[in-house]
Amino acid sequence: MADSAPRYAFRDVAAEDFPLLATWLAEPHIAKWWGAVDEELASIEQSMTSVETRPLMAELAGRPIAYLQYYDPHLEEGHPYQDQPKGTLGIDISIGPPELVGIGHGSAIIRQLVDELFENGAKRIVIDPDPENAQAIRAYEKAGFRYVDTRTSIYGPAHFMALDASQETDLT
């Protein structure tokens, strides 16, 4: 990344984050793509102690601005992405504050996260936005992801995208 590019700090989600996460999950730009706030918070809480998913907060200058998670589909029984090669991790991201949506944070956070995951041995990163979520798809394309196929996940239709470690590009 260029020196002028924002750098984000990633940290594990803590119990103290739940009021902020509840606020974010209720925001229209997130609520449209996520489930009910209580159900999503329960899922995040469960993932805090799971082996397959790691929930994170992304911070900019000490301010939490996004929720993200990565997961290993091979560790979750019956996960629909087990057709992917070993070493694949899936990611999800939501920018929390509405005023920070659509100004480049999503693709920059994703790019920094996937770089770190590749450095730690991941071979492929996948992401699966709703096919109607054009803004998210564009952010993922900007971060280097390419369309693989359209699938049906447990959440409904998915615009399945991937980025392989061998395809890494320096976008700076």
Image (cartoon, helix red, strand yellow):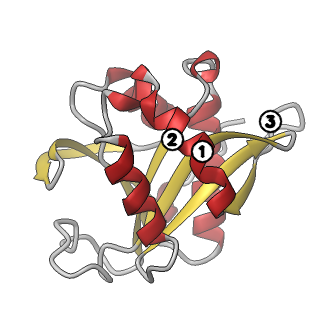
What amino acid does circle 3 point to? Pro
* Disc 1 from disc 3: Cα separation: 26 Å
- Count of picture labels: 3
Mark 2: few, some, or many residues within 10 Å (few <14, many ≥20)?
some
Residue at 37% x, 56% y is 126
**Tag 3 secondary structure:** loop
User: Does residue 87 appear in the picture of this structure?
Assistant: yes
Relative placement, left or right, of 99 versus 139 is: right
Residue at 52% x, 34% y is 24
Residue 79 against residue 126 in the figure, above or below: below
Mark found first going from the N terminus, 1 or 3: 3
Q: Disc 3 marks which residue? A: 6
What amino acid does circle 1 point to? Pro
Residue 156 location (% of width, % of height): 13, 44
Residue at 82% x, 37% y is 2
* Disc 2 from disc 3: Cα separation: 26 Å
**Tag 2 secondary structure:** helix
Mark 3: few, some, or many residues within 10 Å (few <14, many ≥20)?
some
Residue 132 location (% of width, % of height): 22, 24
Q: Disc 1 marks which residue? A: 19
Residue placed most toward the observer, 109 or 122: 109
Labels 2, 3: front one: 2
Q: State the quadrant of the C terminus.
A: top right
Q: Which mark is residue 22?
A: 2
Q: State the quadrant of the N terminus.
A: top right
Asked if marks 2 and 1 touch (Cβ < 8 Å), the reply is yes
**Tag 1 secondary structure:** helix
Labels 1, 3: front one: 1
Quarter of image, res 110: top right
Residue placed most toward the observer, 145 or 36: 36
What amino acid does circle 2 point to? Ala
